Image (cartoon, rainbow, N blue to C red):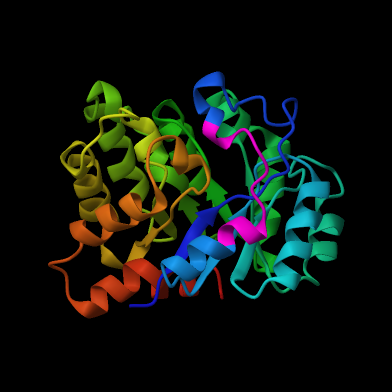
Amino acid sequence: MTIIDTHQHFWKYDPVNYSWISDEMQVIRKDFLTGDLAVVVNEHKLHGTIAVQADQTEAETDWLLKLAANNDFIKGVVGWVNLRDSNIEERLQHYQQFNKLKGFRHVLQGEEPSFMLQKDFINGISKLNQFGFAYDILIFPQHLPAAQQLVEQFPQQRFVVDHVAKPYINDGKIDEWKAGMQQLAQHSNVYCKISGMVTEADWKNWTADDLKPYIDVVVESFGINRIMYGSDWPVCLVASSYKKWLQTVKDYFSSYSTEDQEKIFSSNAIKFYNL
């Protein structure tokens, strides 16, 4: 089976830029670079990965593009650009020259839900499609109604929800999140990454059974053609080894046809990100 990990990060650790890495996350308070990921790629025979922004600067986007140019296993980059900038079109035009740049993301989970409905942000989103860029939606459950309002304005824009919108797995809360995800999934241009779940569960004691009801909702809502595998490496390491997370997702889909597994682990990603 071909595996493309649609969600991983690199960073040179800096306590100011990465202040979200708390004391409990000691294990990831260090550099994570291409050599570190190459070990994972070889061990699990990954076909490739998508490197996603973790710092909201164009400098990081440029750095990720350099890493991608020098490492064949990085098949695409989801960078950051200031979507609210008045010269956004100019910036997108600039980034269009990099064929490994597949889309953009803003850390919306750190903003009020209303942020994504501001006029200047919406203007930025409205420009992405003409330059062939996708958009990764990083949110918490309370942002789902606003995300719904955002995506319905752009039926031609490719969107993907990161980390299944971070449901409160550790608290066992599901209803409100489920309703929001079902609504979002009604838009056929919205995909979902099965990623980043272990860090929303009990880090030390989670089991596949804790995650199953949430994956069930995603699969039932989005269907086999709009879901994709991602690890959220190295963030996932605070709650799981890479191997354990990959095996959990493989086990969940083990009864599915080879063709369906291929979609979830690679071909949906190839289609979505134009790899």
In the displayed structure, would residue 79 be above or below residue 166?
below
Image position, residue 11 (x, y; %): 69, 45
* Residue 156 seen from this side: no
- Which residue extends farthest left? 255
Image position, residue 12 (x, y; %): 73, 43
* 138 within the magenta span: no
In the displayed structure, would residue 110 be above or below residue 12?
above
Tell me where residue 117 sits by quadrant: top right
* Residue 263 seen from this side: yes
Q: Which residues are magenta?
A: 27-37
Instruction: Report the residue at 85% width, 43% height from top.
Output: 86
Q: Nearer the viewer, residue 127 or 38?
A: 38
* Placement of the N terminus among the 4 image quadrants: bottom left
Image position, residue 255 (x, y; %): 12, 67
Task: Determine whether, in the image, residue 145 is placed left or right of residue 127.
Answer: left
* Placement of the C terminus among the 4 image quadrants: bottom right
In the displayed structure, would residue 104 be above or below residue 43?
above
Image position, residue 168 (x, y; %): 32, 27
Instruction: Report the residue at 66% width, 32% height from top.
Output: 118
Tell me where residue 169 sits by quadrant: top left
